[in-house]
Amino acid sequence: MPVVKKRNQQTESRLLLESDDPVELPPAEVEDSAVVLQFEQFRQYVPELLEELRDGTLAEPVPVMMDGSTFVVHGDTRSFWVKLWHSSPERTHVERVQVISCLPSTRGVQILVEDPEGYADDDEYADEDDGDVGDGDAV
């Protein structure tokens, strides 16, 4: 029972950001030590995330997570999947940031297909190199 009590007391002092819609975050105080990483390889990108949170940013829900508390925060070069805990409803002090994923940013990238009719159909090359061994060929 003491574990549950301690856990409840701990979460009461922090407010987990939850929303199904994008949330405009005001500039906030956040200490380097508030960041918890899912994977150590993300550590080199933490300054970019902290800069975004300290300047104020848009946190967009990650639809595939469907939990209402995982957001993507876009930096200049990376997109961070995070969970955020604030110390008050004003969201001006971040108590904890859990970095779940950190991906190269693809914002502003456009893929142009000039002539989709000029590309071969999938079936056109289906039989050429499918790895079949035919007519008694030895392997």
Image (cartoon, helix red, strand yellow):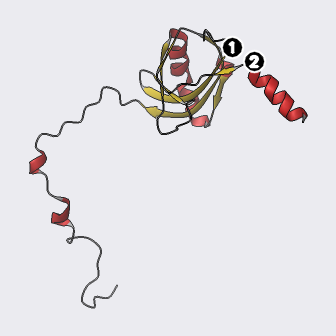
Q: What kind of element bears circle 2?
A: loop
Which quadrant is home to the N terminus?
A: top right
Task: In this rendered view, identify the residue nearer to me: 131 or 107.
Answer: 107
Is residue 33 toward the left or the right of residue 103 in the image? right
Q: Which mark is residue 136?
A: none
Badge 1 density bin: few <14, some 14–19, many ≥20, Cα 10 Å: some
Q: CA distance from mark 2 to mark 1?
A: 7 Å
Q: Is residue 57 above or below residue 16?
A: above
Identified by mark 1, the residue type is: Ser
Q: Nearer the viewer, residue 10 or 68?
A: 68
Outermost residue on the front side: it is 20
| Depicted 77 relative to depicted 119: above or below | above
Residue tagged 2: 13
Quadrant of the rendered structure where residue 107 is? top left
Left or right: residue 4 versus residue 58 is right
Residue 31 appears left or right of 104 = right
Q: Position of residue 66 (x, y in %)?
A: 52, 37
Question: Percent x, y for residue 128?
Answer: 20, 71
Residue for point 16% across, 58% down: 121
Q: How many marks?
A: 2
Three-letter code, disc 2: Ser
Q: Which residue is mark 1?
A: 87
Please state, as top left, top right, bottom left or bottom right, where the C terminus lies in the image. Answer: bottom left
The residue drawn where x is 53% and y is 9% is 26
